Each structure stands twice: as C-alpha cells, then as structure tokens.
Image (cartoon, coloured by chain):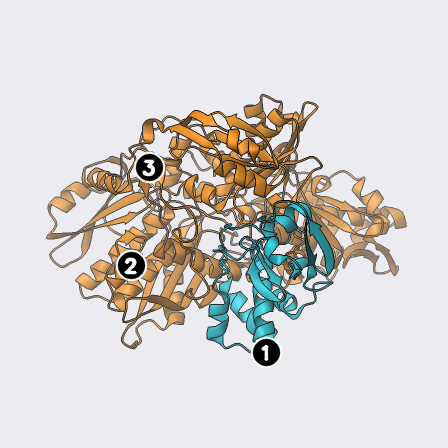
Chain colours: A orange, B cyan
Amino acid sequence: MLHHIEKTLSPRPLPSGGTGRTVIENVSRRGFLAGAAGFAVALQVFPADAYVAYKHGGLTMPNGVVDDPHVFVAIAPDGTVTIVAHRSEMGTGSRTSIPMVIADEMEADWGRVKIVQAVGDEKKYGNQDTDGSRSLRHHIQPARDIGAAVRHMLEQAAAAKWNADPDDVEAIGHEVVHKSLGLRAGYGELAEAAMALPTPPRDRLRYKDEKAFRYIGKGAVQIVDLHDITTGKAVYGADVALPGMLFAVVARPPVVGGTVKSVDASAALKVPGVVRVEQIPGTPLGSKFKPLGGVAVLARNTWAALKGRDALKIAWDDGPHAGFDTVAYEKELRASAAAPGNPVRDQGDPEKALAGAARVFVREYYQKHMVHAPMEPPVALANVADGKCEVWGPLQSPYGARLDIADYLGMKEEDVTVHVTLLGGGFGRKSKCDFAIEAAYLSKLAGTPVRVQWTRDDDIRHSYHHTTSVERIEIGLDKDNRPVAWRHRSAAPSFLSTFAPDEGVQHPIEVGMGLEDMPYEIPNVRAEQCKAMAHTRVGWFRSVSNIPRAFAVQSITAELADELGRDQKDFLLEMIGSPRKLDWQAMGLAQPMWNNGEPAEEFPFDTGRLRGVVELAAAKAGWGRQLPKGEGLGIAVHRSFVSYIATAVRVTLGADGTVRVPEVHVAIDCGFVANPERVRSQMQGACVFAMTAAMHGGVNFENGAVQESNFHDYRMVRSDNFPEVVHAHIVPHPFAVHATGVGEPAVPPFLPALTNAIANAGGKRIRDLPIGDQTKA
Amino acid sequence: MVKLRINGVEQSFDGDPDTPLLWFVRDELGLNGTKYGCGVGLCGACTVHLDGVAVRGCLTTVAEAAGKSVTTIEGLSPDGSHRVQIAWRELNVPQCGFCQSGQIMQAAAMLEANPNPTDQEILEGMQGNVCRCGCYQRIVSAVRHASTGA
C-alpha cells in the first residue's frame, strides 16, 4: 500500500504490462528440452515455459521481487534447511506459507526446515511491505523459482560428485538419487557444493507437477510459530529487551497537529523509577509517519512510566483541527455527496439517462472513522549508539520503517537496522512506523535503549483512521423498472492527506476499490468523488475503501430488489449481468482500472467468477428456503484484492433487537490456494473482524479529539456473540489461475450481507454504520 | 517486601506493591508470555492463575498476590503438553497468536473448575478474552475438544 502511494502521489498508476523481471536469458530452450527428453523420473518436472509468463504486480513494486536462492535458502551440513521469511507475520500465515512453497518445490522435508526472519532490507530481499493481501499473490511463483533453483543446484552438485549426467539424477525427499546406479546423497552432504554453484538461469528451471506437491495446497502444514504461541514463547514487539533499557510511554496531543504549550513534569519525576521526561516535537497533518509529538516519560519499568505520565501536567495548543466534530462532519460529507463531484468514470450518458428515467432510486450510506485496534498495541524497542540505530518491532513494512527512521534521525540508511518481531495483529496500523520512530528518537536523546509502549487508550485515540464516508448512489429505472443509469458519489477524506497537503481528493487506489470498478451491466454509469477534507490522520485499515463501497453497492442492490419485489440474489446476478471480462474503455474510464496493481491481462475482472461465488454461497446457504420468524438470510458479493468473495449471513433478531449470527457461508475464488487451512482461518476471522466493524466500529470526535479510549467504548465482538459457524467454500483452481488476495477481501461483503440479513429478518434497514443500538430502537 | 510464588518458584519484590502482576512478571521476571492488551481488565490477554483461579494480571497487584501462587502460561506445563495447549495446536486455533496465552489460561482455569462445560458455558466463560483476529470459532471448538476429546 505505502509504496504504491509513494510511487503514485500525483500521477495515476498504470498497471504494468511488462514482466519487470531482469532479463530472462533465452538460452537454447529447444536444446534443453531435447536433452531432457529422456528424463523419466517420478517427480514429473516441467520446463520453465509454463511459468515464465507469470506476470504479477509484485514485479513492479518498489525493489521488486528477488528470487535468488542464495538470498533465501541455506543448507547446513546436517541437512537442516534454513529459509528466510521476508514478509511480516501478522496472522495470515505467510511466514509459514511462502517458505513452505520453497520447501515443497525444492523437495525439502518440512520437518527439517527452520525459518529465520529477515531484517528490513529490500535491496537484498525485494519488496517487504506486508499489506494489500499481496504476500502469496506476489511470492508464490518467486518461491517456486527459488525452490526449483535449489533443487537444480543440488542435482548438479550430485551429478558432479558422481561424475554422472545431471539428467540421470533426481532430488526427491531431501536427498538426491541416481536411480540406475543406486546412489544417494543427502541435502546436507551436497549443500556446500550445491550452494557454491551460481543461480541457474530461470529457463533452466524445471517445476514440479502440481500432482507432486507434498505441502502446497494440502493445508496440513501448521504455522511455524504454533508451539511457541501456545507456550508463551513467541516473540512480539514488547518481548525484546536490552540491558539498561528504559521503558517509555508518551502523552500525545489529544488533537492531531496539536503541540505542547507548557509542561510541568515535577510530579512525574518524583515517581520512583521515573528517570527522565523528554519532549517529542509536534507535527501537522501530512507528516507521513512522523510522531505526533508530546511528552515522553522514561522509567525503569512500565508501571513507573505509566504513573509518571499520569502525573504530568500538560497544557496543549490544540492547533487547526480543534473544531473537528463527528456530527458536524457527517453533515458536511452528506452535503458534499449531494452535489456533483469530480468524475472518475463516465460510461454512456448517465446524466441524460437519469434525467429521462421513469424513476430514480436514491440511497445514501455512511460509515464513521474506525481504529484497527490490533490486540498488540504499537510498541518498539530502539537502541541508538555509536552512530548506529537498531530497532525491534512489529512492523508491516520494515524497510519503509528503516528509511523513515533514518530520515527522522538524520542518519544514513545503512546505519539503521530494523528487526521484525511477530506482529500481534496489524490490520494496516503497523504499516505506519510512528511508534518505532518515537523509540529511536527517545533512545537517541537518552543514550540508552528505549522501548516505547502504547497503551490501548493511546492506540484508540491516536490512530491512522479508516476513512469516514458518505456513499450516495442513484439508480435510474426505465418504465419497465430496468436499471438504465447508475451514479455513485463518494465523499471520504483520503489517506493522501497523511502524506501531502490535503486537497480533499481521493487517491486512485481508493477510487479503485469499488468506485471505478463497479461491475454491474448497466449502460450508463457515472462515478464521482466529492471533496472531503481530513481532520485526523487517515490511513488504510484492513480492506480500506472496499468496506464502505461494498456496503453501499450491495445494500442498494438488495433495497432495490425489495422495492421491485424481486429476489435479492436473482436481482444481484441480473445486475452483474453476463459473464465477461470488464473492459476499462467500455466502462468509460480514462485509463485502466487500478486493479490492485495487477496486470489486467493476467488478473482480469471476470464477472463470471463474480457470479460463480454468488451462486455458490447462495446454494450452500440454502438461499430461498423458508426461515423461521425472526431469522433472515442476506447475501453480498465484492471483488477486492483481485479475489471474488460472496458472503451469505444468517441472522436471528431477538425480541429486544439483539442481532446474532449463527451461520455464515463464504464463497471465495482466490485462484490457486497454497494453504487452504489458513484461507479458512482468514475467512472465519474476517467475518468476526467485519462484524465488529458493522456492529461497533466507529470513533467519535469532539473538539478534535477521539472520545473513545478502550474496549468498553470501542467495543469488540466477543465469544458471547460472534459469527458462530463460518463455512468457507474455496473455488478450486490449478496453479495456472493466479493466486490472489486472502487477508482482506472477506471483510467487505460481510457488512452488507449482515445488514441485508437484518432487514430480511424484519429488522431495520441499516444505512449508517456502526449498527450499534439501531436494531433495538 | 512482597513474597509470592511464580510458576512454583519463590519470588520477592521490593518495588511498588501496587504494581500489577502483569508488569511484575514481564518487566522484572522476563516472563513475556503474559501480554498487555488493554490494562483495565477488558481483553484478557494478561490472564494468569492466582491459586488456580483465572485473574487479569493487569488488575491484580503484586500485594494482592502476596503469599499466593501465580501460574503464567510458561508454568502451565513444562513442555506445552497441557490438554488445552494440545487442543489449541490440534485445531490450529491461533492467527497472530498475541491473545492466545490469555485465552489458554482462561480456558485451562475454566476446565479445572468445570471439566464438562456446556457450549453456552464455554461461550460465556471465554467472553472476557478478546481476539481481534477472530479465532472464536476455533477457540470454542478447542475448549470443547480439550474437555471431551470431541
């Protein structure tokens, strides 16, 4: 996400058609194939042709993709294979799944594989920015390249050792065998010679046949940290300590852009254990990830730091956003969305079609700013000493953090090292490294290692908020009630405001999340974005603008179906229309869809697949059956992160208006699946995350400050009322159907499926999120 | 000077007796399996056992634990073989894993007090432990599995 934004701060990003790869030498493939004709082994490997054309957006990410096996794989003499995990682990399982793909392709025994976590170094590892549901999407093929290269090198080494033809040897099951001679050599025995070989050119690589996968696609490999997690040994941000380390907490300005007018630290300094009090300079909106500023208390332990902070007497200058008020701002957004905005899509003649429509069906949907609230609040340890800075933290973008820390401290990139711990949840919050910069800055001031711990209150009050939005949709119907025109106006402050002076205009990425790429087969479509100025730090949050867009589009579809007396699912399929690949020119776009940074040719928007998941979810949920009174079934679909997901939610509505969700069916088409077990866990988790967003998600600003502070008023879905049974139905695909996103795309469709279900159960039609007590009124 | 037992080992503390157990075990003893999530007893990430009963480490002071026996996730079993830990692994419960020490400690204490809870008792017994990743479906299944083997 971040790199995409930085890359595209002004110009519109264009999906790349090129491979972006360094030159692929086309050396004598014909000769190689001829030579391989007699290659008859159980493994059934295939030449590179099948995969060199695997284009994906990872190739055009900053610092691209590195697939050099020498960077990622080491083999010890005892046969232990060490694989580098270069993406951050925040619960999706990518720290396990990418190495698992490497291990499978190189025929390593997973039981003899160890994982080490990379430091932030994109020049070495390629892009490490872990967000946008990209880890498997961008790295499944490079992981196969790495594994195939290591296998090739091991075979070459064995052939040399035995003075045999490389075509007569085969790496299989952690050893290389020569079938006719009956020779075998373990990977450990061959390691030194094999790893001394140069990386083979890609067109010398041969890949395992999918049928020969041992781990990929099976869902039997457990996450590598499972035992440590269940025994308390897993290391998160706050679990790293250094000798002499001070524990810090920071009092930050209640209003973004606020500054310290005066501070009296005398009482704080009297708290036993408090060592020093330091100021961090304040920053205005648009300062990227620079800390908010404030007053830090550094102590011998966390408790002393907290007591010290409570004893600070600070007078704040609240700055230019002191008037920000959620109630007033909602009115502002509604007014903005009621007037014409800047067109981002103009297909046909929507103005004329709306003017000439027999009737126009209008609905408006609203969502508040939300907070990620990962269970592990932001925390980081830094040690600035001898002209170097070393940082440990739960960071989604460790290389981005390295650059930002270097910039803030005025150091060189090479003097900053960023270690990545496990992330106790991320959801986009830990893409923003303000907390790590705080630790580095304070360590530099104090001359000791410093660990900055955010409290939950800090986390809720000082977030990079999910945008708040009004999505207003008008649908023109002809005299036969056929939809002939669609106009969608979106008013939402942009995360661009976190990076540059705010113009109240959304970034193409935000526009690309369900606004420009609305897939319905309607002849006249206009999408506009309407001005909305930011008054808090806006940042991306799991699923980003897809959440309000899916909510609006999928809600109005169900509402209009009801209005016309149609079945909601049938009407939804009719709106999607024929199975086809969306064509940006025919859609009235000025340039290709953002498409999550993926090349359209390889990752087309296929309405056939969109229809497919609707039909699958509906069938599994028993759509159309008679439900008992007080129960309702709702359905919604959305394509995001290049995956197609339809969600069918069944609710019960209690006599007191309490909403419960006994069952959910999620149909996901995310291309080839490396680890179906983790896909299912993501589907289950996404429904819980989305139910929290729908039921409770929303902070309120008064006088510029967030009013909520902890889980009593920023509520979470808990085990006493959650989506109890989530069935994940994965559309099966061969490897050739590219893997797409999993971590985020199940969130957006859940919200409208839930509110549609509530309405179908006889409850209130929800248009404003969060739901809160609206069903109880 | 407060004396208490942590995971079977006698410990003493001469710092602020109002220090919550959470910060004592983490900052002083380096027992990092007990997690900070909210600081006010709303999330359960810091759940430990005080004389066998699940309590929130952020709300229980060292003074309140004087003379008592505290068990943290590190002391639940020597090798991670408590039936709840095994069930957690068999059902692949965790995603990010951060809240899981607290979930496991809560479940273990609940099953100690009530070896065969009903589904409703499991839901209610675990409702004080928040999982933002949303692993509840598997948490509930794992508690049931640890209880009945089902």
Where residue A773 is drawn, which disc sits there? 2
Asked which secondary structure carries label 3, the reply is loop
Q: Is residue A575 left or right of residue A438?
A: left
The Cα–Cα distance between marks 3 and 2, rounded to whole angstroms, is: 26 Å
- Nearer the observer: mark 3 or 1; the answer is 1
Q: Which residue is mark 3?
A: A493
Q: Residue at x 27, y 48 (%)?
A: A366
Q: Which residue is mark 1?
A: B148
Vertical relation: A96 (above or below) A728: above
Residues under numbered marks 2 and 1 in contact, where contact means CB atoms less than 8 Å apart: no
Q: Chain of mark 2?
A: A
Q: Residue at x 53, y 40 (%)?
A: A307
Vertical relation: A38 (above or below) A401: below
Going by the numbered disc 3, the residue's amino acid type is Pro
Q: Quick one: label 3 or label 2, which is nearer the N terminus? A: 3
The Cα–Cα distance between marks 2 and 1, rounded to whole angstroms, is: 37 Å
